[in-house]
Image (cartoon, rainbow, N blue to C red):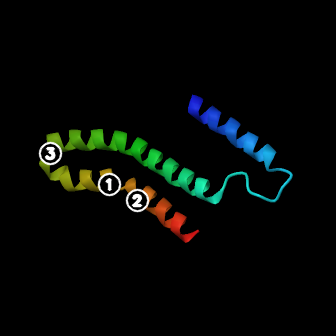
Amino acid sequence: MEFILAFVDAAALLAQQGAGSASPAIPPTAAAALAVGLAAFGAGYAERGIGAAAVGAIAEDRDMFGTGLIMTVLPETLVILALVVVFVV
């Protein structure tokens, strides 16, 4: 939580400094890095619960391996899409 507050404070400071000029508050490379980083953080957070549930399901029934694998890998598509957006923009 402290990291988020520090980030918001830094972003507000950058916005105030750039208010008089036509330059963006965050440079494009930093914005791209932030987008991919937040997407990776979100995917990791989602995989935390999915992975634990998948391992539990596989321990009870071996036939759930394929479903558990697909559900575990699914959030990683967010990071792949974020990388695609970075290269497109």
User: Residue 83, percent across and down?
Assistant: 47, 62
Q: Give the residue at the far bottom of this rendering.
A: 88
Q: Give the residue at the far top of this rendering.
A: 2
Q: Are marks 2 and 1 in contact (CB under 8 Å)?
A: yes
Q: CA distance from mark 3 to mark 1?
A: 19 Å
Q: Nearer the viewer, residue 72 or 40?
A: 40
Q: Are marks 3 and 2 in contact (CB under 8 Å)?
A: no
Q: CA distance from mark 2 to mark 1?
A: 8 Å
Residue at the location (53% across, 64% down)? Answer: 86
Type of amino acid under label 2: Thr
User: Residue 20, percent across and down?
Assistant: 86, 52
Name the image quarter holding residue 50. Answer: top left
User: From where the camera sits, is residue 1 visible?
Assistant: no
Q: How many marks?
A: 3
Is tag 3's residue or tag 1's residue first in the polypeptide sequence? 3
Disc 3 residue crowd, few under 14, some 14–19, many 20+, Cα 10 Å: few
Residue bearing the label numbered 3: 61
Which of the image's four quarters has the C terminus?
bottom right
Vertical placement of residue 84 versus 41, above or below:
below
Type of amino acid under label 3: Asp
Label number found at residue 77:
2
